[in-house]
Image (cartoon, grey):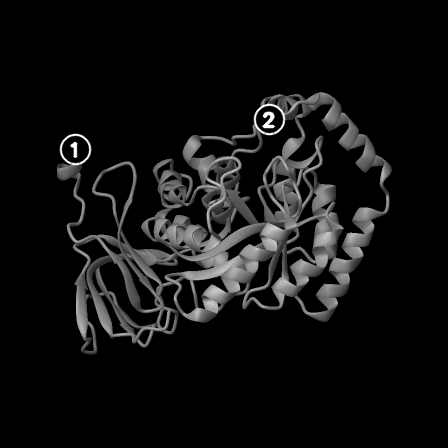
């Protein structure tokens, strides 16, 4: 993102600020940052060019703290690997059309045959992302969410080496042992395993039971991993999120380790404990758009209705993020500024990014124009990243054209 940044003005906009929506407002941008916000529409300075928003919502660019999509772009079908560079270039363009301007690519540092994840593949993706960012060729702000599997201690060196190369150091601590977390419902988990196992032979029920017994008997691996995490936190602090917490007790353990964020709590009492501890609570956008969890776990919309969620993330589907926010508004759960904060400012605060996620003077000029015009799903018409226009629909979509 090294282009020369022209100054620009966005006019005739419904500007979504942290606590209000200002109709007929304008935003001035200079040097990659927001110079002024004119609620009356009358800007105080002259700008090189103007963009007429034509009444569209103008809001901060979406900050996505968890998205598994890079792995899918690399492996669109089982046993089908595409070049990581090609996959990343495609994904960036998909993200722009979803309004995402800052992406934390979730990279799982582990070996797992079922999910086609390998430690070597994770290292390659992370290294490529670092090189891509340093090259200045990126279209959006690319970051990494390092997924640390507590049963993969061999991955720790690679994770902490990668963390030191990133401007935002962020780790998600994962435990996908059947019988807890996302997989509390063993019968449902075994059903999902059956189709996969039948393609490769083996007894899925036996495999699951054996794994549970082995891990229950292992009293050394997780304490060893936790000690290493604690040591690294003392050396070079980073942000930690817990993942798929299924009990207040699990929240307490991860919080004591340094977690300030919890991803996808699977029960209300778990989310309530995270709230009591002052943690940021993350919910998945597809859960909201679908009307429930794909795994039969906690409804994300219910968490928002109870005041027990702060941030919306893609999880595995970035196009659901803006529709999820508007769904919360339509259902009367939050107002529009609150829904937009869940996509932007709250996410920035959760991982300590200053001056990002709000339309305020001095904040980085990551902005999107979004139109709804009575349609159920919002349409992204313009994306500006760090003061550079990255996307503009040349013929903005209108409802009467699409009907």
Residue 63 visible here: yes
211 relative position to 167: left or right = right
Q: Quadrant of residue 146?
A: bottom right
Pointer 2: residues within 10 angstroms few (<14), some, or many (20+)? few
Residue 244 placed where, x, y %? 63, 41
Give whichever of 71, 256 is nearer the camera.
71
Residue 330's disc is none
Q: Residue at x 63, y 46 (%)?
A: 118
Q: Residue 60: x percent and y percent?
A: 36, 59
* Number of numbered discs visible in the structure rendering: 2
Indicate the quadrant where residue 28 lies: bottom left
Image marks 1 and 2: residues in contact by CB distance under 8 Å: no
- For disc 2, the marked residue is 196
Q: Secondary structure at mark 1?
A: loop
Q: Is residue 237 above or below residue 151?
A: below
Instruction: Compare residues 118 and 342 and report the one nearer the observer.
Output: 118
Q: Position of residue 183 (x, y in %)?
A: 65, 31
Q: Quadrant of the C terminus?
A: top left
| Sooner in the amino-acid sequence: mark 1 or mark 2 | 2
Mark 1 lies on residue: 403
Of residues 52 and 164, the one nearer the viewer is 164
Dot 1, crowdedness within 10 Å: few (<14), some or many (≥20)? few
């Amino acid at each position: 993102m090294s282009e020369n940044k022209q100054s620009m003005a966005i006019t005739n906009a419904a500007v979504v600020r942290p606590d209000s929506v200002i109709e007929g407002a304008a935003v001035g941008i200079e040097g990659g940052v927001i110079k002024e916000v004119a609620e009356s529409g009358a800007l105080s300075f002259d700008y090189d060019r103007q963009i007429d928003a034509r009444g569209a919502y103008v809001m901060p660019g979406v900050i996505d703290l968890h998205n598994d999509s890079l792995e899918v772009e690399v492996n669109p079908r089982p046993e089908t690997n595409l070049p990581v560079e090609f996959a990343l270039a495609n994904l960036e363009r998909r993200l722009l059309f979803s309004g995402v301007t800052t992406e934390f690519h979730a990279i799982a540092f582990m070996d797992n045959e079922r999910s086609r994840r390998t430690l070597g593949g994770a290292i390659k993706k992370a290294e490529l992302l670092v090189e891509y960012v340093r090259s200045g060729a990126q279209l959006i702000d690319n970051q990494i969410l390092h997924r640390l599997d507590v049963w993969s201690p061999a991955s720790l060196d690679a994770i902490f080496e990668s963390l030191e190369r990133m401007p935002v150091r962020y780790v998600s601590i994962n435990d996908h042992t059947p019988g807890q977390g996302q997989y509390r419902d063993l019968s449902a988990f075994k059903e999902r395993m059956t189709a996969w196992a039948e393609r490769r032979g083996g007894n899925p029920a036996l495999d699951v039971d054996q794994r549970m017994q082995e891990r229950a008997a292992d009293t050394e691996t997780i304490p060893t991993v936790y000690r290493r995490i604690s040591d690294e936190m003392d050396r070079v602090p980073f942000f930690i999120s817990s993942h798929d917490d299924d009990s207040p007790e699990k929240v307490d353990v991860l919080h004591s380790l340094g977690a300030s964020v919890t991803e996808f709590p699977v029960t209300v009492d778990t989310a309530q404990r995270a709230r009591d501890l002052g943690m940021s609570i993350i919910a998945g956008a597809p859960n909201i758009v679908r009307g429930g969890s794909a795994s039969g776990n906690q409804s994300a919309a219910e968490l928002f209705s109870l005041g027990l969620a702060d941030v919306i993330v893609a999880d595995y589907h970035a196009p659901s993020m803006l529709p999820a926010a508007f769904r919360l508004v339509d259902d009367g759960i939050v107002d529009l500024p609150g829904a937009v904060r869940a996509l932007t400012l709250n996410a920035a605060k959760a991982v300590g990014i200053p001056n990002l996620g709000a339309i305020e003077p001095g904040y980085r000029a990551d902005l999107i124009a979004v139109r709804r015009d009575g349609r159920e799903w919002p349409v992204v018409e313009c994306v500006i990243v760090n003061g550079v226009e990255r996307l503009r629909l040349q013929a903005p979509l209108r409802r009467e054209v699409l009907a």
